[in-house]
Image: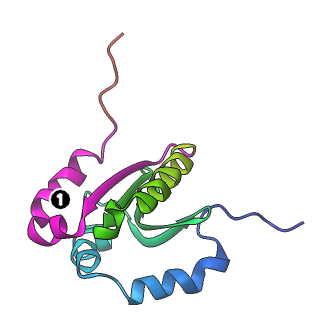
């Protein structure tokens, strides 16, 4: 019986590698801030796959995905795809943060602050 991979399917390895080699300027800039556990000592991966989807950045410890979007993500077809992917990831209790490429390039520190705000779970209600 073959093992079913949900996380980082071996069959996607070549695609993931190609995406890393052809990163956008925004991905390169954000990766320079996330790599080597620079952000709160959390390990992020880039071009990580979960199920049929390849994610820009993923931190398994806190189940956080960071997606960077270009202009094509404003198109209806891409919006539908993104919503479908979000529903899929939520079944694994994975949260998603989305930023526009130009936001990362023009306001990197603001993007990092927003990510930091989402690194810890929300406060639990008092009993």
Residues 49 and 103: in front is: 103
Q: Position of residue 20 (x, y in %)?
A: 41, 83
Q: What is the quadrant of residue 53 in the picture? A: bottom right
Residue 109 in sight: yes
The stretch drawn in magenta includes residue 100 = yes
**Residue corresponding to mark 1:** 111
Q: Quadrant of the C terminus?
A: top left
Report which quarter residue 35 is drawn in: bottom left
Instruction: Name the foreground residue: 38 vs 51.
Output: 51
Q: Residue furthest top?
A: 127
Q: How is the image coloured?
A: rainbow
Q: Nearer the viewer, residue 75 or 57?
A: 75
For residue 59, say whether it is visible.
Answer: no
Estimate how packed mark 1 is, as few (under 14), some (14 to 19) or many (20 or more) residues with alpha carbons within 10 Å: some
Residue at position x 38%, y 51% in the image = 96
SS under mark 1: helix
The residue located at (15%, 53%) in the rendering is 113
Answer left or right for 103 relative to 49: left
**Residue at position x 19%, y 51% in the image:** 114
The image shows residue 92 at horizontal and vertical percentages of 56, 46
Q: Residue at x 45, y 56 (%)?
A: 82
Residue 28 place in picture, x, y as percent: 26, 80
Is residue 122 inside the magenta stretch? Answer: no
- Side (left or right) of 26 relative to 80: left
Quarter the N terminus occupies: bottom right
Q: How many marks?
A: 1
Q: Residue 50, position in %: x, y?
A: 57, 62
Residue at far right of view: 1
Q: Which residues are magenta?
A: 92-121
């Amino acid at each position: 019986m073959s093992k079913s991979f949900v996380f980082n399917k071996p069959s996607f390895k070549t695609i993931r590698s190609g995406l890393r080699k052809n990163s956008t300027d925004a991905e390169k800039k954000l990766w320079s801030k996330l790599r080597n556990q620079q952000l709160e000592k959390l390990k992020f991966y880039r071009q990580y796959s979960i199920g049929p989807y390849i994610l820009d950045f993923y931190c398994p410890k806190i189940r956080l995905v960071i997606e960077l979007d270009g202009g094509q993500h404003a198109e209806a077809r891409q919006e539908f795809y993104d919503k479908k992917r979000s529903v899929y990831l939520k079944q694994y209790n994975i949260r998603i943060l989305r930023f526009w490429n130009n936001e990362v390039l023009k306001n990197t520190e603001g993007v990092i602050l927003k990510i930091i705000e989402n690194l810890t779970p929300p406060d639990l209600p008092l009993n």
